[in-house]
Image (cartoon, rainbow, N blue to C red):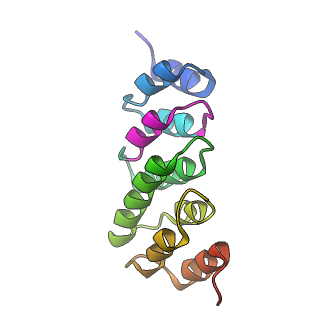
């Protein structure tokens, strides 16, 4: 029976997309984060992870890692964008994910800019978001 440490080691080192997709069903947030940091994790697994929830800190870190993932396609990034918007509306601060999304060419600037108008967005984040999107101050 694999231990949580075994799952974590696989999430870091595995290259097989089927195995990585299976690992996305694992219940451990540290494994989710390792998968989101593994450049070989396929978009299907990344999309599953966009709905994974544990705690505010773990969720925000996971969303940032997903937004930064080099293999995240438009579908994955839209799922992350929606999750980030929901978190902002709840008053949480997934600011790292917001800024990472602003740097993704797969998303339209208008899609990401809307995050700056949500309930949990601070003035500083709106400013940084504008800079990242190349908007006039």
* Near-viewer residue (13 or 79): 79
Query: If the image is split into quadrants, where does the N terminus sit?
Result: top left
Whether residue 72 is situated above or below residue 26 in the rendered picture: below
**Percent x, y for residue 74?**
49, 51
Residue at 53% of width from left, 47% of height from top? Answer: 66
**Percent x, y for residue 21?**
44, 26
Asked if residue 95 lies in the magenta stretch, the reply is no
Drawn side of residue 70 relative to residue 119, left or right: right
* Near-viewer residue (112 or 65): 112
**Percent x, y for residue 99?**
59, 66
Residue at 44% of width from left, 76% of height from top? Answer: 114
Could you say which quadrant of the image residue 90 lies in? bottom left
Whether residue 44 is situated above or below residue 10 in the rendered picture: below
Query: If the image is split into quadrants, where does the C terminus sit?
Result: bottom right
Drawn side of residue 90 relative to residue 70, left or right: left
**Percent x, y for residue 51?**
35, 46
Residue at 63% of width from left, 35% of height from top? Answer: 39
Query: Magenta span covers which residues?
Result: 37-50
Is residue 112 at least partly visible in the picture?
Answer: yes
Residue lying at the far bottom of the rendered structure: 137
């Amino acid at each position: 029976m694999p231990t949580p440490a075994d799952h974590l080691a696989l999430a870091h080192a595995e290259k097989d997309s089927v195995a990585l997709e299976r690992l996305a069903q694992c219940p451990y947030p540290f494994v989710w984060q390792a998968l989101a940091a593994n450049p070989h994790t396929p978009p299907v697994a990344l999309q599953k992870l966009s709905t994974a929830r544990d705690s505010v800190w773990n969720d925000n870190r996971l969303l940032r890692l997903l937004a930064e993932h080099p293999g995240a396609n438009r579908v994955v990034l839209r799922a992350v964008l929606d999750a980030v918007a929901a978190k902002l509306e709840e008053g949480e601060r997934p600011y790292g994910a917001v800024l990472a999304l602003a740097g993704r060419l797969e998303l339209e600037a208008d899609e990401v800019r809307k995050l700056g108008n949500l309930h949990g967005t601070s003035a500083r984040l709106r400013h940084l978001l504008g800079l990242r999107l190349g908007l006039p101050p």
